[in-house]
Image (tube, rainbow, N blue to C red):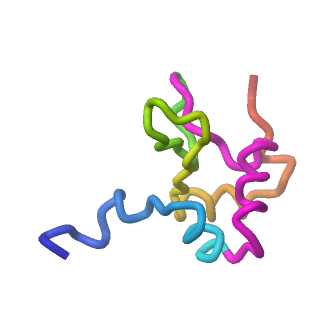
């Protein structure tokens, strides 16, 4: 693909519609719910660890999430009590 290595970290980022299928979930809505409830962490300023990024255009109010498949799989493999954010 035009010199793009398929093993680069960039290739791990997938849009919601593709990510939910790759993660074995039943719907894209379930994936969005996991962002909303904190199961998967959204990138915010000052946070290094995250599985989700918002790539919406600057003037859009509707989020457009992308998911890092490898990081999501690792996060979802943890027991729920180990996913709690440390304050």
Q: Nearer the viewer, residue 71 or 35?
A: 35
Q: Specify the farthest residue to the left.
A: 3
Residue at 48% x, 63% y is: 14
Q: Identify whether 65 is placed above or below 46.
A: below
| Residue 31 locus on image (x, y percent) | 71, 59
Q: Specify the farthest residue to the right.
A: 81
Q: Is residue 29 magenta?
A: yes
Magenta residue span:
24-45
Residue at 65% x, 42% y is: 41
Q: Identify whether 2 is placed above or below 9.
A: below
| Residue 85 locus on image (x, y percent) | 75, 34
Q: Nearer the viewer, residue 48 or 6?
A: 6
The image quadrant of residue 30 is bottom right
Left or right of 75, for residue 34: right
The quarter in which the C terminus is drawn is top right
Left or right of 61, for residue 8: left
Q: Nearer the viewer, residue 60 or 22?
A: 60
């Amino acid at each position: 693909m035009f010199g793009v290595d398929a093993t680069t970290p960039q290739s791990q980022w997938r849009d919601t519609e593709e990510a939910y299928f790759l993660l074995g979930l039943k719907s894209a809505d379930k994936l969005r719910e996991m962002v909303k409830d904190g199961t998967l962490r959204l990138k915010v300023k000052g946070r290094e660890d995250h599985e989700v990024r918002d790539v919406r255009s600057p003037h859009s109010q509707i989020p457009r999430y992308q998911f890092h498949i490898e990081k999501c799989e690792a996060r979802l493999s943890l027991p729920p009590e180990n996913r709690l954010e440390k304050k």
